[in-house]
């Protein structure tokens, strides 16, 4: 009996061990199957994401092509506009605005020390008027703070050359240099690149015959700088050259001659600035409103 007992025991242990191994393998197979299935699902999800990304990429590429086409079209249109604007600037001399408006542009030329410029700014602020100044670049360079204040107050600046150079007395290269030096002085004073659309020739030199060949040459130089040549239709220096240049006479002359659309030329002199408050109030009594060049010319465009 002992032999039978000891003979059966190893078989039971061996059978249990095999069952245990079988269960382990079964669990391992199940684990591998689950892992493989999860990987399959992940790959399907990834494939779906890739398909979606490819579709988005295709859409982006299509949009980019469309944007490039639009960009090319805008560039072409801008080039045409630049050419048209150049042609307009190079063929135009502004003497006045639309006569159907009640606006009158106040423009003041050259320059002065901070005291007189500051007084001018206070008069304009007290009367709620914006004006257009045509300072020489050298004056801007001497007193940058007052011109910066002028722009901050809402007034605009126009190019009047750096040194008040009479155009016909210098070379075309010197004219360009004068325009550039004015721009550099203003940019330095303001701390940023200032865009002006207006140029006034000192003493009207080169523009006494606006449609002549000399004026045409200068208009092209000015147009290349993005500016229009601006003159005036009411001024004092020539009109009163044979009279006493008094504040009272200045006021009388301007109020007698200014009308809707006029561009009034003043200078930074004691008499001109002293006359400014009465010029403003006198224009308003006549139903005219003092303004800057831009305000006058934009009103013309909207009419």
Image (tube, helix red, strand yellow):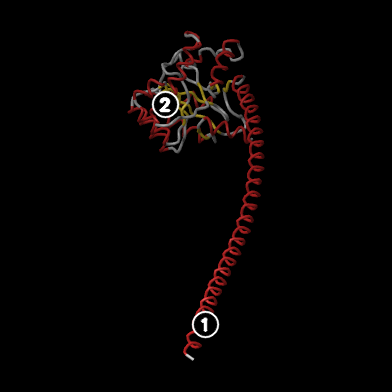
Q: Which residue is mark 1?
A: 12
Q: Residue at x 60, y 23 (%)?
A: 86
Disc 2 versus disc 1: distance between alpha carbons? 106 Å
Q: Residue at x 41, y 32 (%)?
A: 150
Of residues 162 and 31, the one drawn nearer to the viewer in this rendering = 31
Residue 73: percent from left, percent from top = 66, 33
Q: Residues within 10 Å of mark 1 (few under 14, many from 20)?
A: few
Q: Secondary structure at mark 2?
A: helix
Q: Can you say whether 14 is above or below 259 in the image?
A: below
Of residues 35 and 206, the one drawn nearer to the viewer in this rendering = 35
Report the quarter where the C terminus lies: top right
Q: Can you say whether 81 is above or below 180 in the image?
A: below
Mark with earlier residue (2, 1): 1
Image quadrant assignment for residue 226: top right
Q: Which residue is mark 2?
A: 186
Residue 260: percent from left, percent from top = 57, 30
Q: Residues within 10 Å of mark 2 (few under 14, many from 20)?
A: many
Residue 290: percent from left, percent from top = 50, 33
Horizontal side, residue 66 vs residue 31: left or right: right
Residue 223: percent from left, percent from top = 56, 21
Q: Secondary structure at mark 1?
A: helix
Horizontal side, residue 246 vs residue 30: left or right: left
Quick check: marks 2 and 1 in contact, CB under 8 Å? no
Image quadrant assignment for residue 300: top right
């Amino acid at each position: 009996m002992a032999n039978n007992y000891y003979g059966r025991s190893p078989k039971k242990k061996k059978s249990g061990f095999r069952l245990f191994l079988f269960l382990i393998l079964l669990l391992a197979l199940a684990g591998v199957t689950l892992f493989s299935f999860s990987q399959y699902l992940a790959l399907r999800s990834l494939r779906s994401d890739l398909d979606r990304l490819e579709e988005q990429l295709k859409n982006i590429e299509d949009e980019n092509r469309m944007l490039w086409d639009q960009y090319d079209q805008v560039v072409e249109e801008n080039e045409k506009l630049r050419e048209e604007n150049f042609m307009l600037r190079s063929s135009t001399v502004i003497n006045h605005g639309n006569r159907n408006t009640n606006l009158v542009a106040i423009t003041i030329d050259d320059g002065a020390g901070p005291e007189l410029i500051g007084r001018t700014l206070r008069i304009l602020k007290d009367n709620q008027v914006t004006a257009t100044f045509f300072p020489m670049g050298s004056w801007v360079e001497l007193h940058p703070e007052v011109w910066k204040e002028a722009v901050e107050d809402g007034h605009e600046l126009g190019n009047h050359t750096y040194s008040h150079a009479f155009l016909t007395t210098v070379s075309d290269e010197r004219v360009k240099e004068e325009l550039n030096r004015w721009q550099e002085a203003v940019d330095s004073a303001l701390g940023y690149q200032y865009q002006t659309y207006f140029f006034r020739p000192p003493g009207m030199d080169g523009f006494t015959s606006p449609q002549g060949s000399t004026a045409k040459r200068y208009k092209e130089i000015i147009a290349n700088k993005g500016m229009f040549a601006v003159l005036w239709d009411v001024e004092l220096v020539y009109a009163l050259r044979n009279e006493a240049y008094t504040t009272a006479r200045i006021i009388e002359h301007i109020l007698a001659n200014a009308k809707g659309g006029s561009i009034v030329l003043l200078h930074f002199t004691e008499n001109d600035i002293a006359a400014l408050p009465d010029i403003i109030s006198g224009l308003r009594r006549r139903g005219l409103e003092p303004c800057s060049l831009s305000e006058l010319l934009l009103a013309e465009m909207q009419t």
